[in-house]
Amino acid sequence: MATAPKQHLMTDGLILREYDTTAEADRFVAILTRDKGLLRASARGAKRLKSRSGAATQPLCYARLSLIPGRDRYIIEDAQPQDVFFPLRQDVEKLALAQYFCELALRLCPTDQPAPDHLRLLLGGLHYLCEDKKDPLLIKAVVEGRLLSLEGYMPDLTGCCRCGKEGGELVFSPTAGTLFCSAHAAQGDGLAVSSGVLAALRHILYGAFERCFAFSLPTPEVAALATLMERFLLAQVQRSFNTLEFYHTLRP
Ligand SMILES: [Zn+2]
């Protein structure tokens, strides 16, 4: 008796990473998809010169995908490229940052459940990196902050966590994820927060999703925002990222 054909999954996704690069012709990839979150898939013969799915299954390609569920991974039956983010491939610093976004996504995005906001955030980050109109450090802080908030890591930025004071000198504790006034400043890991940086943090974490990249800050405050968001992220997820360390080696 013939078995019914397995249901195809039609979705779109961003190729995050290639793994098992020893395979000669096939490509094994991790993808952030709109409908199933993170998944692993292989594309038969994708590394061959004339393969139709070759370009569309490379890391940092956003593609329309037709996937067949398999035992331990999906098979990519068809992949139509929607965006290859070409400018990223010509700038080593932006490429490094984009690869860090992918490693973050691999760590923080859900599997086996829809992830449209995660995907939209990643694609937004890559688009803004390509556009070259926003400081890459600002884009980095938004991607980090919003990914964290999607996963429930939400700091309390209303005011000093002891007395509620909202103005004056405030410090932010990356480990506690809370603000302290100067009288209640925590020992150790508190970072001073200017009013501009605090407004940016609130915008990133509490603001409307579709506007999360839509703000600007003077350059020194962008640097402070980026430092603070990165410290918060590393303190919350409690691990390091090879791609982030590499990105830092590229920056003076
Ligand atoms: Zn206080």
Image (spheres, helix red, strand yellow):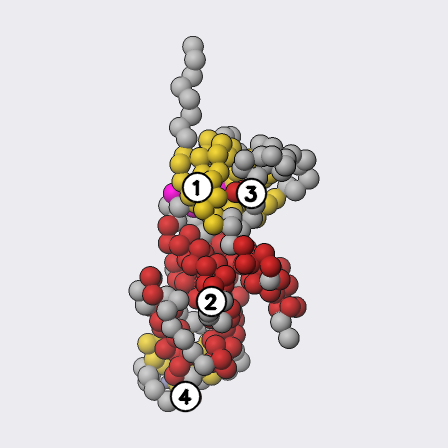
Distance Cα–Cα, label 4 vs label 1: 49 Å
Q: Which x, y percent locates residue 249?
A: 66, 68
Closer to the N terminus: mark 3 or mark 4?
Answer: 3
Number of marks:
4
Mark 1 and ligand 1: say if the CB distance to the nearest ligand atom is below 8 Å: no
Taking the spot 45% from the left edge, 38% from the top edge, the residue there is: 65
Taking the spot 40% from the left edge, 40% from the top edge, the residue there is: 11
Q: Are marks 3 and 4 in contact (CB under 8 Å)?
A: no
Q: Nearer the viewer, mark 3 or mark 2?
A: 3
The answer to which image quadrant residue 10 occupies is top left
Taking the spot 31% from the left edge, 64% from the top edge, the residue there is: 208
Q: Give the quarter of the figure containing the N terminus.
A: top left
* Residue assigned mark 3: 55
Magenta range: 35-39
Disc 3 element: helix
Q: Nearer the viewer, mark 1 or mark 2?
A: 1
Q: Nearer the viewer, mark 4 or mark 1?
A: 1
